[in-house]
Image (spheres, helix red, strand yellow):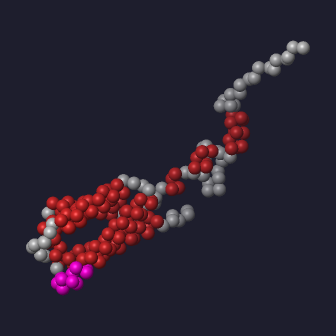
Amino acid sequence: MAAKQPPPLMKKHSQTDLVSRLKTRKILGVGGEDDDGEVHRSKISQVLGNEIKFAVREPLGLRVWQLVSAVMFSGVAIMALAFPDQLYDAVFDEESVSSKTPIRLYGGALLSISLIMWNALYTAEKVIIRWTLLTEACYFAVQFLVTTVSLVESSRIATGAVLLLVSRALFVLISIYYYYQVGRRPKKV
């Protein structure tokens, strides 16, 4: 008995068959609106979500503050590395410094932080922006405390040091403000 050959399979062109495409999309659950009112074009975009949802809503002036911080950190770092005597004189109103090494090390540390600030300026990731702002706030707070203790120990008040203290307190407040603003959850519209 000869085996009967099955009829040849016909290929279905689902891309041209509109009804088949609509049925497939309905089974997959794409093409219609979901609970959030979004229309997904594919199952992948439905599963992964829309990246616009995750974009950081930046508070007004954040990028300007990041630029100002990066420029400020870079400027002070270069001044501490190249002209340690002048930097010390500008802050503490003293001509001589016993050793330039600590001031140059301070400049190197500031230069490292400034590189982080410059890189954070070009990122859109919320976590990186927040960590950079927190680093900045901690730096300013420590500098405020160290300068205050130094002034109390020397029992004299220099105009440059007082200006430094006031500016650092202001910078701490600005950095903390942006830190919390970036971390805030967006309001549902």
Q: Residue at x 18, y 83 (%)?
A: 154
Q: Position of residue 13 (x, y in %)?
A: 68, 28
Whether residue 171 is visible: no
Residue 153 occupies quadrant: bottom left
Q: What secondary structure do most residues of the magenta stretch adopt?
A: helix
Q: Residue at x 62, y 56 (%)?
A: 36
Q: Quadrant of the N terminus?
A: top right
Q: What is the total number of numbered labels drawn onto the structure image?
A: 0
In depth, the one of 104 and 175 nearer the eye is 104
Q: Residue at x 42, y 63 (%)?
A: 130
Side of 175 relative to 155 (left or right): right
Examine the rendered structure and indicate whether residue 62 appears above or below residue 37. below
Side of 134 relative to 168 (left or right): right
Q: Position of residue 82 (x, y in %)?
A: 15, 60
Judge whether residue 155 is colored magenta: yes
Whether residue 99 is visible: yes
Residue extending furthest toward the left: 95
In depth, the one of 25 and 85 nearer the eye is 85
Residue extending furthest toward the right: 1
Q: Residue at x 72, y 35 (%)?
A: 19
Examine the rendered structure and indicate whether residue 144 appears above or below residue 134. below
The magenta segment is 148-157
Q: Quadrant of the C terminus?
A: bottom right
Residue extending furthest toward the bottom: 155
Residue 126 occupies quadrant: bottom left
Examine the rendered structure and indicate whether residue 82 appears above or below residue 39. below
Q: Position of residue 117 (x, y in %)?
A: 33, 59
In depth, the one of 58 and 72 nearer the eye is 72
Judge whether residue 175 is colored magenta: no
Residue 107 occupies quadrant: bottom left
Q: Position of residue 123 (x, y in %)?
A: 39, 54
